Image (cartoon, helix red, strand yellow):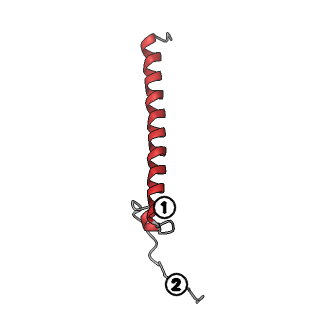
Amino acid sequence: MKITTETILGIAALTALGIALIVGFKKSKKVNLYQIADEGYETAHDILYPKQIGREKKLRYGPVLPA
């Protein structure tokens, strides 16, 4: 199997695109976390992770006594 210049350039372009996407996602995540920290919601789970669909149904606030 012969590797042509077009194949090598295609693989290089896909690799560069993948690296750019990974770096972009990491940067946007870091910016979002800094913004949340500045607002003072460091511990609020729904603010940190707003896109989570399945939350626990037995969510309790305050002290919980064992049953």
Query: Disc count in the image?
Result: 2
Q: Secondary structure at mark 1?
A: helix
Q: Position of residue 43 (x, y in %)?
A: 51, 68
- Where is residue 7? Give x, y as percent: 44, 16
Instruction: Establish if 25 lies above or below 67.
Output: above
For mark 1, what is the residue? 37
The one nearer the camera, 9 or 36, is 36
Residue 15 pos. (x, y %): 48, 28
Q: Observer-nearest residue: 33 or 60?
A: 33
Camera-nearest label, 2 or 1: 1
The outermost residue toward the front is 38
Residue 34 lies, with reference to residue 45, above or below; the image says above
Q: Disc 1 residue type?
A: Ala
Who's the residue at 46% across and 10% down the image?
A: 4
User: Where is 55 relative to 27, above or below?
Assistant: below
Question: Residue 52 placed where, x, y %?
Answer: 42, 62
Residue at 48% over, 61% down: 37
| Amino acid, disc 2 | Gly
Q: Residues within 10 Å of mark 2 (few under 14, many from 20)?
A: few
Q: Between marks 2 and 1, how big is the CA–CA gap?
A: 23 Å
**In front here: 67 or 35?**
35
Helix, strand or loop status at disc 2: loop
Of the two numbered discs 2 and 1 on the same chain, state the one appearing first in sequence.
1
Q: Is residue 21 above or below residue 60?
A: above
In the picture, the quarter occupied by the C terminus is bottom right
Residues at marks 2 and 1 touching, judged by CB atoms closer than 8 Å? no
Residue depicted at x 49% and y 9%: 2
Q: Dot 1: within a 10 Å radius of its alpha carbon, few (fewer than 14), some, or many (20 or more) residues?
A: few
Q: Which residue is found at the position 47% from the left and 22% from the top?
A: 12
Classify residue 51 by image quadrant: bottom left
Q: Which residue is mark 2?
A: 62
